[in-house]
């Protein structure tokens, strides 16, 4: 058969189904848990079309200004450009779109006709807010029940200001509420309102309550330490303003390092991070480890606390020992092997435990909802439904602790799943498209399966792209609560131009130029086969394409 061209999307799509017109894609888009249309956005940034780029982003992710700052960018780890020179600054470009676009010129999707269905969302974090946003756009009446004083979950109450200015998140939350979503804050389900009352009052319920219950360290005087998330929450609320000169944090993840950086900003001169992980297998993001080196954070790898030291009711330090190995059981509890040797003492004025989190789901007791061994909600991998009819789950409450982008993606998919449940719409080939008139329509654009993910080895013409260094965001060297990352700003188009557009045709015309049989033509929408019967199946188009966007199947007679 003649060549098949995998094309870039032309309209904002809410659904992430594999498209009939886009059979190939990039590792970055495959790795993005939020489902961002990365290549389309970067193509628009290259042309400085920031408003249109934001429309494509917000069709999948209502929080690009937030994820563009605090996502751990797994997309960049898999970027094919890494094999050529340096990976794309995908997170930086996402933030640039959110920061630079003139929002008064950004078209917003119109809410569909009211369906008469009512959806309750338990939890006002990224997963709950995202699901509420899309569910409201689909025409359903949505009410969020949030235990805290404000919406936003962990990003609002625990992510430090120097990483995420709260006015950015608050603005994006406002755009969610603008669609007609109702919110009841300071309403803890199981205390202020019973789960059964919600269940009987709504047509569907989404549990997106996160993982707010912090794990304990069962060691002597462990109650003298403050929990990591609680510490960050109290700092943001202005309840903790000083921590003393020396601080110890137990834990090696992102929360532990947020605590460490926050302690430095509260005036601590000496900050220690004590973690189980070895130096070569840290779970904290590489960006955090680089910042730790810059700010003089002392990391004690392969180490575990055996006792919190105290005097007259105040913490004075931690007794710890080296470990040789550790693992976690099905419930998420650590199993530790000591390396032997002498114990050491680290002195401190404040000790913080950031050793993991789990869901707090006491409010569903007796509701017949199954849990996983680690305490998360057991859900169907496709429908996101729990074992109870009409009850769905998304975000950390279903997956365990993860990143904000994952919660956003889960929230959107939950909204789609609940919409299908309430309307009886089969998944099949449905794709929700936002048209030029901002109306959301269902179109049969999808096909079964997943798009083929293009690897660098499949790109036969990378020389089409000049080697160019990655454009980096400016970082402040001041240790303060002012935003540390200055963003890309003016260098965003140049960075976007580095994108390989793996698996997506970007209409360069190389295939048409190099076709020896002259069977291809180049209309405005991209290359097309004009004379299919005259195709030689030579593969020149495939070899010439700098994006690996061409695929074909040889007819049987050419294979014998």
Image: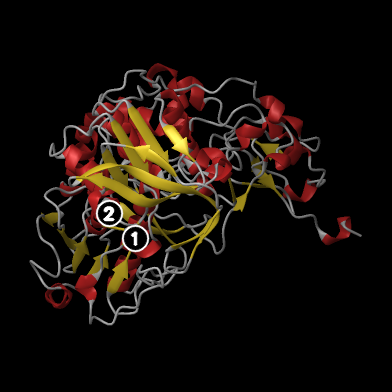
**Residue farthest to the right?**
560
Residue drawn 62% across the image and 33% down it: 82
Q: Position of residue 263 (x, y in %)?
A: 28, 33
* Residue 370 versus residue 69 in the image, above or below: below
Residue drawn 55% across the image and 40% down it: 279
Mark 1 lies on residue: 218
Question: From the viewer's perspective, is 130 left or right of 96?
Answer: left
Question: From the viewer's perspective, is 294 left or right of 28?
Answer: left
Question: From the viewer's perspective, is 389 left or right of 453?
Answer: left
The residue closer to the viewer here, 339 or 206, is 339
**Which mark, by number, is residue 134?**
none
Circle 2 SS class: loop
Among the 4 quarters of the image, the one containing residue 213: bottom left
Residue drawn 43% across the image and 49% down it: 35
Contact (Cβ within 8 Å) of mark 1 with mark 2: no
Q: Position of residue 228 (x, y in %)?
A: 29, 46
**Which mark, by number, is residue 221?**
2
Numbered label tally: 2
Among the 4 quarters of the image, the one containing residue 269: top left
Residue drawn 39% across the image and 46% down it: 319
Visible residue check, residue 12: no
Q: CA distance from mark 1 to mark 2?
A: 9 Å
Circle 1 SS class: loop
Quarter of the image containing the N terminus? bottom right
Q: Position of residue 58 (x, y in %)?
A: 33, 43
Q: Position of residue 146 (x, y in %)?
A: 16, 57
Among the 4 quarters of the image, the one containing residue 140: bottom left
Quarter of the image containing the C terminus? bottom right
The residue closer to the viewer here, 72 or 311, is 311
Front of the two marks 1 and 2 = 2
Visible residue check, residue 389: yes
């Amino acid at each position: 058969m003649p060549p098949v061209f995998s094309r870039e999307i032309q309209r904002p799509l809410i659904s992430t189904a594999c498209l009939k017109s886009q059979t190939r894609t990039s590792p970055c888009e495959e790795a993005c848990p939020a489902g961002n249309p990365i290549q389309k956005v970067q193509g628009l940034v290259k042309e400085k079309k920031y408003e249109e780029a934001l429309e494509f982003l917000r069709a999948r992710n209502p929080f690009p200004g937030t994820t563009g700052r605090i996502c751990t960018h797994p997309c960049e780890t898999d970027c094919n450009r890494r094999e050529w020179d340096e990976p794309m600054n995908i997170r930086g470009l996402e933030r640039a779109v959110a920061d630079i676009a003139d929002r008064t010129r950004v078209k917003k999707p119109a809410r569909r006709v009211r369906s008469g269905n009512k959806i309750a969302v338990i939890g006002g974090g990224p997963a709950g807010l995202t699901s509420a946003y899309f569910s409201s756009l689909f025409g359903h009446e949505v009410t969020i029940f949030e235990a805290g004083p404000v919406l936003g979950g962990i990003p609002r109450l625990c992510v430090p200001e120097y990483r995420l200015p709260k006015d950015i998140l608050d603005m994006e939350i406002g755009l969610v509420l603008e669609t007609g979503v109702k919110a009841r804050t300071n309403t803890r389900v199981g205390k202020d309102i019973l789960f059964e009352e919600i269940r009987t009052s709504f047509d569907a319920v989404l549990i997106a309550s996160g993982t707010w219950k912090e794990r304990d360290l069962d060691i002597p005087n462990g109650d003298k330490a403050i929990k990591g998330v609680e510490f960050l929450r109290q700092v943001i609320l202005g309840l903790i303003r000083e921590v003393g000169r020396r601080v110890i944090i137990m834990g090696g993840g992102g929360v532990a390092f947020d605590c460490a950086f926050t302690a430095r900003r509260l005036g601590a001169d000496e900050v220690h991070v004590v973690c189980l992980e070895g130096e070569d297998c840290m779970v904290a993001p590489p960006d955090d480890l680089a910042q730790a080196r810059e700010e003089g954070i002392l990391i004690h790898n392969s180490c575990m606390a055996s006792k919190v030291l105290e005097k007259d009711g105040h913490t004075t330090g931690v007794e710890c020992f080296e470990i040789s190995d550790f693992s976690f059981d099905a419930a998420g509890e650590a199993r530790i092997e000591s390396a032997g040797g002498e114990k050491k003492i680290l002195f401190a004025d404040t000790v913080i435990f950031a050793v993991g989190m789990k869901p707090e789901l006491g409010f569903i007791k007796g509701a017949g909802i199954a849990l996983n061994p680690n305490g998360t909600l057991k859900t169907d991998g496709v429908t996101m439904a729990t074992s109870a009819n009409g009850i769905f789950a998304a975000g950390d409450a279903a997956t365990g602790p993860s990143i904000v982008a994952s919660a956003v993606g889960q929230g959107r998919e939950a909204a789609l799943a609940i919409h299908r449940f309430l309307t009886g719409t089969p998944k099949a080939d449905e794709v929700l498209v936002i048209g030029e008139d901002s109306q959301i329509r269902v179109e049969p654009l999808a096909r079964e399966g997943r798009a083929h993910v293009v690897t660098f080895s499949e790109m036969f013409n990378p020389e089409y792209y000049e080697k160019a260094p990655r454009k980096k965001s400016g970082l402040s060297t001041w240790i303060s609560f002012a935003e540390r990352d200055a963003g890309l700003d003016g260098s965003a188009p140049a960075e976007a131009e580095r994108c390989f557009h793996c698996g997506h045709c970007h209409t360069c015309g190389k295939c048409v130029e190099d076709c020896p049989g002259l069977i291809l033509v180049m209309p405005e929408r991209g290359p097309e086969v004009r004379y299919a019967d005259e195709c030689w199946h030579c593969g020149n188009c495939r070899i010439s394409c700098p994006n690996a966007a061409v695929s074909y199947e040889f007819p049987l007679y050419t294979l014998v």
